[in-house]
Amino acid sequence: MSFELKTHLEEIISLSDQEFEHIAAYFKPKTLKKHQYLIQEDEFVNHIYFVVKGLLKATFTDANGKEYIIQFAMENWWLSDFRAFYGHVKSITNISCLENSELLSISKENLDQLCSESHKMEHFFRIKNSLGYVALQQRILSLLTTSPKERFEQLAQQYPQLMQRVSKTIIAAYLGISRETLSRLSAKV
């Protein structure tokens, strides 16, 4: 699992083997089965996770019991309930596995210590957080300003591998459309 993390980190920062060994010591492996929860609503969240292998989804359930898919996370993505992680409050999301998954976790305490010791890692997480914010902003704008057809085409173009790994029912829920609408849209593509 360390190889995947090192490769991912080196997309943004350069590391010697010694530097990486020091960084890797802060991470702990975690293995989950399909349908197993990583985080459940109303829990305190003290870790963020790097996806080595597998696919997960983060969901929010409203007061009426309607579930909304906030995001997916597959290989080389980071995942947590970031509001709970950074805000020291209970989670409002559920994160569950759509496939058997292998993760690397780092606690808030270890992340803070690692970033205070290593300018490179502080830089890495600043860049990742900024990119995550941009992606979230794009998703919100897409939901507000584009048609279901445009959202489907954007998702299919940006994440074609996701379309092969997730059921149409889950894709439809993520896009905020019905399963029937998705079937019509995907038949046209």
Image (cartoon, rainbow, N blue to C red):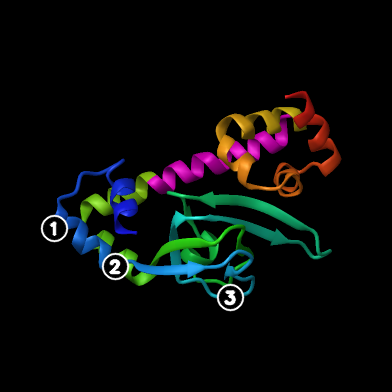
SS under mark 2: loop
Query: Looking at the picture, how far across and down is residue 183, in whole percent?
Result: 81, 36
User: In the drawing, what numbered circle is on residue 72?
Assistant: none
- With 175 as the anchor, is 179 left or right in this view? right
Disc sitting over residue 18 in the figure: 1
Q: Amino acid at mark 3?
A: Glu
Residue found at x 51% / y 50% = 74
Direction from residue 184 to residue 37 in the image, left or right: left
Please report contact status of discs 3 and 1: CB closer than 8 Å, yes or no: no
Say which of marks 3 and 2 sits in front.
Answer: 2
Three-letter amino acid code of the residue under disc 2: Tyr
Q: How far separated are the C-alphas under marks 3 and 2? A: 22 Å
- Which residues are the magenta region? 128-147
Predominant SS along the magenta part: helix
Q: Classify residue 168 as left or right of residue 34.
A: right
Residue beneath disc 3: 43
Task: Calculate the distance from the C-alpha at mark 1 to the C-alpha at mark 2.
Answer: 14 Å
Amino acid type, label 1: Gln
Q: Please name the residue that numbered disc 2 is placed on.
A: 26
Residue 170, percent across and down? 72, 49
Secondary structure, mark 1, is helix
